[in-house]
Image (cartoon, grey):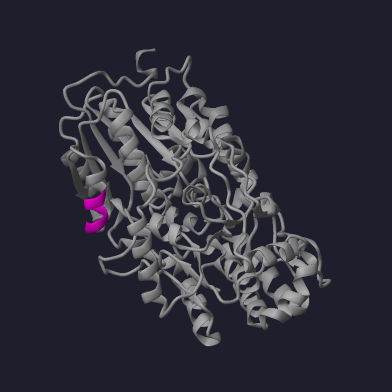
Amino acid sequence: MRDRHVRVRKHAGVKLVLVHSHYRPGGVRRIVELGCSALVRHLRPRPTSVVLVGGEAPDPAWLAAFRRRLDDIPVTCAIERAAGYASEMSARPAAVVARIRALLARVLPDASPSNCIIWAHNLGLGRNLLLARELTRFCVRRRLPLVSHHHDWWFDNRWQRWPEMRRAGFRSLAAVAATILPTAPTVRHASINRFDGRILHRHFRAQAGWVPNLGGPPSPPSTTQVSQARRWLRDQLGGPAPVWLVPCRLLRRKNLAEAWLLTRWLRPEAWLVTTGGASSADEAAYAAALGAAARRHGWRLRLGVLAGGESAKPSVPALLAASETVLLTSLQEGFGLPNLEAAAAGRPLLVRTLPNIAPDLAQFGYRFPQSYDELLVAPLLFDWPAEHRRLAPRWLAWRRQLPRSCRSLAEAPPLLAAGATARPVPFSRLTLVAQLEVLANPAEQSWAACAPLNSFLPAWRERAALGRLAVSPQPRGAMHWLGERAYARHFSALLHARPARAPSPTAGAAAAAEFFRAKLAGANQYPLLWTRTP
């Protein structure tokens, strides 16, 4: 029974080792910076040093700010390309494994259960299964506590990872599940929403726990910083104009064409601005298609305003505070950090409701006055027959790429299930080709066709014109769930949990099978996510 719980005893020095394939801008990096700060201040025993392990070096400006956030705690980096995304490496698996093993031996030469905590992010995304496997094996041999923090999953509309994983030597779903959801006694699985947490807890019991993200920056940007951000935006956009901001990278799942459709309907004079650019080859075609359409039609759309190498840029919190309105039109999210950041910044938020995170946000006390389930569009605004002809072969091709045992679980998407008869449809369920066809219509024409289909839109338009979109109030008790002390408390409870009995050896495969059934339901099928090409 001795090995069934993690032992982290008081020690002269506890090293907190963060493992992530990259430290590019995005939600995971934000949690790394906020969460690490919370753990350094409030976890007991207190970490006395931090190591960032990854496949590429962090941006120097971000790293400097990260170090300042941690006050007197030394921060070092251990960078090895073999720890990055498998799709961005050309080396053979055996060579990658050798380099990962050498990396771990170099970073953790004297690691023991009493002086080291490993905090790994997004191993469940499946971007480097060799890293996940070798990290787990290393921790098991040394009996090191490993907290595997799951923000996203490879089986959540990222099935293109499956051939990539097979090429790396993982030939079965059971092998993949055992790698990203190991049952080893020193491993703990952290989820960021309760939907995932319930599934993990059913199979891993006390070795799984809910660690919700922090609720935003510890202090708001200063008045000077907000003024500087407004001036910077004016310079970037060529003059003063309202800014509607989407704080995200250029990812297909962010459904950015929908954000632009809402902006041009509700605030035609505004610029829609996204913060990050495309950070992987998988998203390049999507980003290019959006950018080309914006240039062709002269849209007030600025993509990736913070992308690039210039150093004098405002922070995301300053940009949020400097913007008129924030939007989040994502098809899927693990937590919904922009929801909380918009509330913290006192900015109105237009947000698409996601059923896996909405109950958690409600439990924290948040209410979002401008939330909606779907944005319906009239079929006369795009070529319905052509779209229907596109959908069927694309869905079948997507279904064929699934692991054979999963194909029968894949339900038809709503538009195919509804048949070939033209009818109002959710904008989110269209291919990018059809989305851009809708956007090519004059804004007033598409508004006239769609406003009657969405009862909430006329009131929102009136309020937007008057500058009276409602702000999501900051709940009085939110920090009970989302403050730094709460974060360290959730993390510590999971880290030190003492399971009464070990999970089944097949717990990983059983949990994965339950996730597959949920993720392959028709309600979760979006053409934007089937392929990397528009």
- Horizontal and vertical percent for residue 8? 29, 21
* Residue 38 seen in render: yes
Q: Is residue 80 left or right of residue 233?
A: left
Displayed quadrant of residue 484 = top left
- The residue lying furthest to the top in this view is 1
Picture layout, residue 113 above or below residue 293: above
Task: Name which quarter of the figure residue 358 lies in.
Answer: top right
| Residue 341: in magenta span | no
Quadrant for the N terminus in the image: top left
> Residue 392: image x %, image y %?
70, 69
Of all residues, the one furthest to the right in this rendering is 421
Q: What's drawn in magenta, residue-wise?
A: 60-65
Q: Main secondary structure of the magenta part?
A: helix
Whether residue 493 is situated above or below residue 147 in the rendered picture: above
Horizontal arrangement in the rendering, residue 37 relative to residue 257 (left or right): left
Quadrant position of residue 259: bottom right
At x 37% / y 42%, what residue is drawn? Answer: 218
Nearest the camera: 231 or 413? Answer: 231
- Counting labels gives 0
Q: Is residue 95 visible?
A: no
Q: Nearer the viewer, residue 405 or 276?
A: 276
Q: Nearer the viewer, residue 220 or 140?
A: 220
Q: Position of residue 346 (x, y in %)?
A: 50, 51
Q: Is residue 112 above or below residue 31?
A: above
User: In this orientation, which residue lies closer to the viewer: 52 or 131?
Assistant: 52
Task: In the rendered view, tell whether residue 437 sits above or below residue 320.
Answer: below
Horizontally, residue 73 falls left or right of residue 346, namely: left
Identified at 55% across, 67% down, the residue is: 256
Residue at horizontal 25%, vertical 51%?
A: 65
Percent coordinates x, y for residue 483 in the rendering: 43, 35
